[in-house]
Amino acid sequence: MRILVDEDSQARAQLNILRTDGHDVVAVGELDKNGIPDPEVFDLAQSLERVLLTHNTEDFHELHRKRPGHHGIMSVYRDADPRKNMSHTEIAGAIRRLETSDVTMVGGFHILNHWR
């Protein structure tokens, strides 16, 4: 899968796991785009024809509703209790499960927490 990783999700360990899993991964920071507004991140993902991976669920869910027809968004909810948050390995596993399901990625907004 071709993935653009948002600034809030671009930990080196996460990128390495996704790349080891065979994904074509580019992080916002690797493109010198850290700090750009969410709509620009969204547009960047579309121009690069990549699924977006983010922890910024609320803002990107709003963009998903306003601008359908995108390449897909995978989002991870963070909990106030850090023990409930997904690790990098769990995120990669959720992406594997999502990718091998019958769910269509294009145009979808996928909460990875549901794919644990």
Image (cartoon, rainbow, N blue to C red):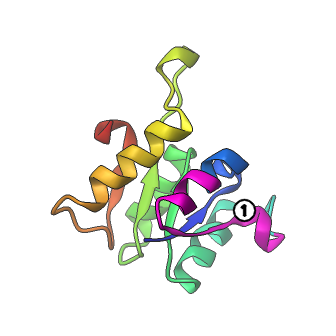
Residue 21 rendering spot, x and y as whole percentages: 47, 59
Report which residue position mark 1 lands on: 37
The three-letter code of the residue at mark 1 reads Pro
| Residue 76 at least partly seen | no
Q: Secondary structure at mark 1?
A: loop
* Quarter of the N terminus within the rendering: bottom left
Left or right of residue 68: residue 9: right
Q: Residue at x 64, y 48 (%)?
A: 9
Q: Residue at x 48, y 35 (%)?
A: 77
Mark 1 surroundings: few (<14), some (14-19) or many (≥20) residues within 10 A = few
Residue 71 rendering spot, x and y as whole percentages: 41, 75
Above or below, 47 against 13 in this view is below
Left or right of residue 100: residue 35: right
Residue 99 rendering spot, x and y as whole percentages: 30, 61
Give the total number of marks visible in the rendering: 1
- Residue at the far front: name it: 20
Residue 61 rendering spot, x and y as whole percentages: 44, 53
Above or below, 108 against 95 in this view is below
Q: Residue at x 36, y 45 (%)?
A: 94
Specify the segment rendered in magenta.
Answer: 16-32
| Residue 17 at least partly seen | yes
